[in-house]
Image (spheres, grey):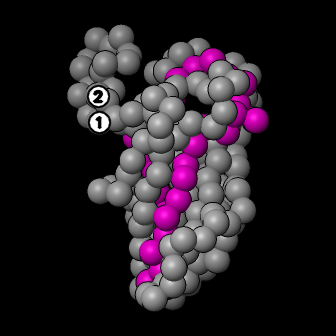
């Protein structure tokens, strides 16, 4: 069976760029119907480097295989060009030092906008790189990937999830 769990939580911390921060959805969209739910605002990188946030989560005891990162959010602006995301992570077991480099980067992008408009929901997914094991504490950096992202829209991240097949 496939399981999804949210991975944004207490350990979520925007980077120092000032381009990523928590706010209410309705502070960014001109809607008739108010949506005061929280989101992580991820402004367009604009050539200034990757911008995002740091977080952590634990690999569940029933984890078996087929890991995916699921990105859900709202387009803030008329979509054009390529919207790109990336993630680096590091898995640590009990008594392993967290003072180690992140493992390889995994990325996903979308440049096909047929059927999408300002204020539309979008879902993207990718397979994270790195070694994942049951009970590991995962520390990660999730970001708008400046090298692939030449869009001018902002992105309102409403959910970041870890999907896997259970044992």
The residue drawn where x is 42% and y is 79% is 60
Which of the two residues, 2 or 43, is positioned nearer the viewer here? 43
Which of the two residues, 50 or 62, is positioned nearer the viewer here? 50
Where 111 falls versus 57 (above or below)? above
Q: Is residue 134 left or right of residue 88?
A: left
The residue drawn where x is 54% and y is 71% is 99
Where 128 falls versus 14 (above or below)? below
Q: Position of residue 72 (x, y in %)?
A: 49, 43
Q: Position of residue 3 (x, y in %)?
A: 46, 70
- Magenta residues? 134-162
Residue 120 among those drawn in magenta: no
Where 4 falls versus 117 (above or below)? below
Disc number for residue 38: 1
The residue drawn where x is 67% and y is 39% is 145
Q: Which residue is mark 2?
A: 24
The residue drawn where x is 58% and y is 77% is 132
Q: Is residue 105 left or right of residue 8?
A: right
Q: Is residue 118 left or right of residue 115?
A: left
Residue 75 in view here: no
Q: Pointer 2 and pointer 1: residues touching (CB < 8 Å)?
A: yes
The quarter of the picture where residue 114 lies is top right
């Amino acid at each position: 069976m496939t399981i999804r769990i949210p991975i944004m939580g207490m350990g979520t911390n925007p980077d120092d760029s000032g381009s990523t921060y928590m706010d209410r959805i309705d502070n960014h969209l001109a809607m008739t119907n108010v949506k005061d739910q929280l989101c992580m605002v991820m402004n367009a990188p604009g050539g200034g480097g990757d911008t995002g946030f740091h977080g952590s989560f634990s690999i569940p005891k029933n984890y078996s295989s087929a890991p995916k990162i699921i990105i859900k959010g709202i387009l803030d602006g008329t979509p054009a060009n390529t919207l790109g995301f990336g993630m680096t992570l590091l898995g640590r077991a009990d008594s392993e030092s967290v003072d180690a480099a992140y493992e390889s980067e995994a990325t996903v992008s979308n440049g096909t906008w047929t059927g999408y408009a300002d204020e539309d929901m979008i879902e993207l997914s990718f397979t994270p790189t790195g070694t994942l094991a049951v009970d590991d504490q995962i520390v990660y950096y999730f970001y708008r990937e400046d090298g692939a992202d030449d869009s001018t829209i902002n992105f309102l991240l409403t959910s970041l999830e870890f999907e896997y097949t259970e044992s």
